[in-house]
Amino acid sequence: MNWLAAQFGEGWSEYNAWELHWTSDVWGGTFAFLGVLIVLSLWFLWTSLARIRSPWKKTGLYALRAMTLLAVVAAILQPQLEFKKIQPLKNTLAVLLDDSKSMTIKTYPSEKSRSDGVRRALENNREYFERLKQTYEVDFFFASDKIEPVSMANAAAEYRAQAVNTNLHQVFLDVAQHYEGRSLQGILLFSDGADLTQEASGISPEFTETLTRLNGPVHTFQAGSNEGFKDLAIDKVDATDFGFIHQPLNISVSLSARSIGKKNIPLVLKEGDKILVSKIVSLKDDHLRYTADLQFTPTSLGKRIYTLSVPVFAGEAVEVNNRWSFEVKVIRDRVRVLHLNGRPSWDSRFLREVLANNPKVDLLSFFILRELADDVGASTSELSLIPFPSNLLISDYLNSFDLVIFHNFKFSPYIDKKNLANIKQYVEQGGAFLMIGGNLSFQSGGYDRTPVEDILPMRIGSGSREFLLGELQMGVQPKLAHHPVLRLENDPAQNAKAWKSLPPIQGANIGLTPVKGSHVLATIRKHKTDVPVLVTRRVKKGRTMAIATDSSWNWNFRRVGEGGSGRYYQKFWGNVIAWMTGEPETYPIQVETDKEKYREHEKVIIHFKVSRQDYNPVPGVEVDLVVKSLPQERERVRQTLTTDERGEGRFEFAPGREGFYSAQVSLTSGGEVLSGETRFIVFSPQVEFQKPLVNEALLKAVSKVTGGRYHFLEAGMKIENLPFPNPEVEIKSSSRMVSLWDSWWTYGLIVGFLTVEWWLRRKSGLS
Amino acid sequence: MRLNLFILTACLQAGILMPGSALALGDASKIAIPQIQYEGGNYQPRPHAVGSLLAQIAKRTSIEVNRKPLSLKPGDPRLYRYPFIYMGGRETFQPFSEKALKALRNHLTYGGFLLIDDNSSKPNSAFDASVRRLIRRLFPHIPLQRLPRDHSIFRSFYLINQVVGRVVNKPYLEGITTKGRTVLVYSANDLGGAWSKSKLGHWEYDIIGGGNRQRRLSLRLGVNIVLYALTLDYKKDMVHLPIILERLRRVNPR
């Protein structure tokens, strides 16, 4: 071989093999055509040589023509000589270690997990793998629904059963792709066979086809067994992501029970430590799967975390699947508003229109259309008027409203004075109360020294029965410009401009003094003093507001007449409703995460913005951030952080393990604690426990299809005598091509043969 | 001393010591109804009609009214201080300018209400023709339609099952309804004639046909129209329906 390479000069001696290549560019039909042409040509030549007597000449001429044709064909087929350097290579074996969560399931009576069995097998058979390495390349992989390479030295130490899904078919597809073009001669698979994509009875045709394409055998090692397997599990919970407050929510629960026996077990739904609902599920000996439907009513707004649980019985293989937590975002379906109007007016007409057209509002209006002194000139049956159901509204059903509005409404004689205490109690317990001005409100409504005055944001001065008239331009207090009620535009400068663009009001209740702790959002200027018009207050759990005018409708209708629109009027009332009903976006401390759901070990970014009760940002202040895991309320992180110049801050948190978490930011200011909270989920799917049983049939089938052997992985098992093919494998480390046809001597040979043939024919008397 | 105290009390009651403030509700918060002052024809053939209606409203309902007569041209920007406007007449009037039409259309679309009243007492009068031309220009895509019997106008205060005026040319009201709200009502029955009272308190125009009952019904209808403009579909809220339907059954068993 070296001799042939040496003929091409220096630098060719390194090659130890050669190979002749023909072109692949020529079409197959061309070969057929050339073949026919050559045969016909030679046949015609042979018949044309009939006059030549000498057999030597005849043969010579014939040979020359044949040689010419062969040289032409060779030129067409473009032969090339490849010199190669070939080296022998080791075959490869792959060791697959199932690291899915199902490998954490214990086997009885040893109470060792399946993964423990695999880890021990790796340690006990280290020598065997070392021996294998002398003959083969041995690669180790963690396998679940994908493969992840790991060194043999670290395989046992780094082995953790935490992958969330098992798909052995996908694993073998990945292996085939990984070893494409390489000599894989066998696989060792350590697994429980609990493959979520395969049936317990065997193997799918697609998986079989993938296995048959592999070169070597797959020897399977079954980790764990089903002997004594006992498990009660919540397999699935069907619940909507969101629900409405005070409205029943249905959930459907799927359970499975293996070897638990005939028992009645309680299925309990809790929020924190509070039991919301429970149901008895009757387990039977011959029954595996059960379903149960539960109904509960959320009573708090926001992201709520509920936990379903069934008892854990002694000897259960999996305990984590006896509990299932889920999150429901509880929202208001509609804000229920009670709107009591002392008399029909344009102010009440435009407000009613805004409320009635707001899809988030469920409105109940009452207008006092007739007073006792009015002479309607008709019998009751000719009137559409109904008695004002004061007892029903102010006593029985008051708590069913989210917001109560007294719109230029004098309570007497419609509401008993003693029932005004109900309104105070309603607010203190979390309700919202708004009094809108007019000559039937505040002082004129007789609210001084009543429980309603106690909760109003303004004190009603005695004897100050006044109503200021005229075109009064209302001004927003710059110090409270961040208040959500005042937010007509997001940009502060635009917002200030928006307020200035509103037409003046035409009257205001005066003689009202803001109480301590209230926020005067807007005033009118009269006699060099600021008269409060929009005032808010928090009263224990509730909120109150006073709008000391009955002409806010000017911001709608009159503004249209001035070339504007009623957009700001609608926005203003949207803001009032949102703030009064305590929508989460009106909390002074806003906490949010960059996502709602995180995978295990994913970084959580918590962002917060801190404002005071007056919604002014609080820069450079220390706040406490506490991250707790739910529902146990176990504190995971406590940090003191400082807000930046915009009153904002950020914190990164690595939750690590799956679960529900809350992040709470709180600020203590002047003895008052403000706080905001958000919740997030760190999830790790538990689908692995939906098919927790060892699938012996699958492992056996995998071995059988590939010609491998199935083994049960016993404690202390020594692996030996596993057959693997070991064909010779060579690798071409370098090569060089030499063209044999596109050279002068190839064409010279053709011309030479033709010339000699021509000369001989002439000599033989042929043309 | 006693005299001084009396003077002080009187001054306080009159608000003399508190300039710019008042004990009573100001005129701006009271319900006032301006009349449209159009070109051509007499725009005010029943000059006391609106004032008389407002007086009846004040007498019969809790609504506070401002009876001061007020007339505004159709394009007057002050129209936007008065969501309810009245337009009466008995003759042909000049077509409104495009600017006035646009202002009136905006007024009605964004919350206003217009009551048109044919005071001619004649069916298919010249005023009627002018009104229909005006409405076609005002709302070219919305037809003027009869208000159904269950419209809130007929139950906003009184339960009404008969549409009348000083005359009964058409026993129904017509209207323009957009986005669920009736913004314009047209009566061909001279409601203003039935409402009008002189300053001395006498009815100014005789009722043709139905006597006092017809006047009473006309006044009730006027009250209901104003109440509807102020409360919209309030009487269709579920809380009212059972009682109203029961009373309607009693009044009209059919």
Image (spheres, rainbow, N blue to C red):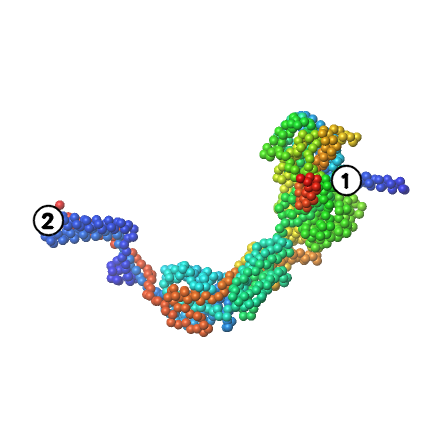
Q: Can residue A259 be seen in this view?
A: yes
**Label disc, if present, on residue A51 of the rendered structure:** 2
Rendered residue at 75%/29% (across/down): B204
Residue extending furthest toward the right: B1
The residue lying furthest to the bottom in this view is A716
In the rendered image, which residue does mark 1 sit on? A374
Position of residue A130 measured from the top left corner of the image (x, y, whole percent)? 40, 70
Quadrant of residue A214 within the rendered picture: bottom left
Label 1's element? loop
Q: How crowded is mark 2: few (under 14 residues within 10 Å), some or many (20 or more)?
A: few
Is there a contact, CB below 8 Å, between mark 1 and mark 2? Answer: no
Label 1 is placed on what type of residue? Answer: Asp
Question: In screen coordinates, is A443 left or right of A757?
Answer: right
Report the front residue among A491 and B189: B189
Say which amino acid is labelled 2.
Arg
- Identity of the residue drawn at 24% across and 59% down: A7
Query: Residue at position x 69%, y 54% from top?
Result: A430
Could you tell me residue A374's position as x and y percent? 77, 40
Q: Work out whether residue A483 or residue A109 is closer to the camera in this orientation and state it.
A: A109
Q: Is residue A590 left or right of residue A53?
A: right
Are callouts 1 and 2 both on one chain? yes
Cα separation, mark 1 vs mark 2, equals 146 Å
Q: Nearer the viewer, residue A345 or B21?
A: A345
Q: Quadrant of the N terminus of chain B?
A: top right
Task: Name the residue rendered at 48%, 66% in the picture.
Answer: A693
SS of the residue under disc 2: loop
Q: Earlier in the sequence, mark 1 or mark 2?
A: 2
Pinpoint residue A639: horizontal percent, then vertical percent: 61, 61
Disc sitting over residue B76 in the figure: none
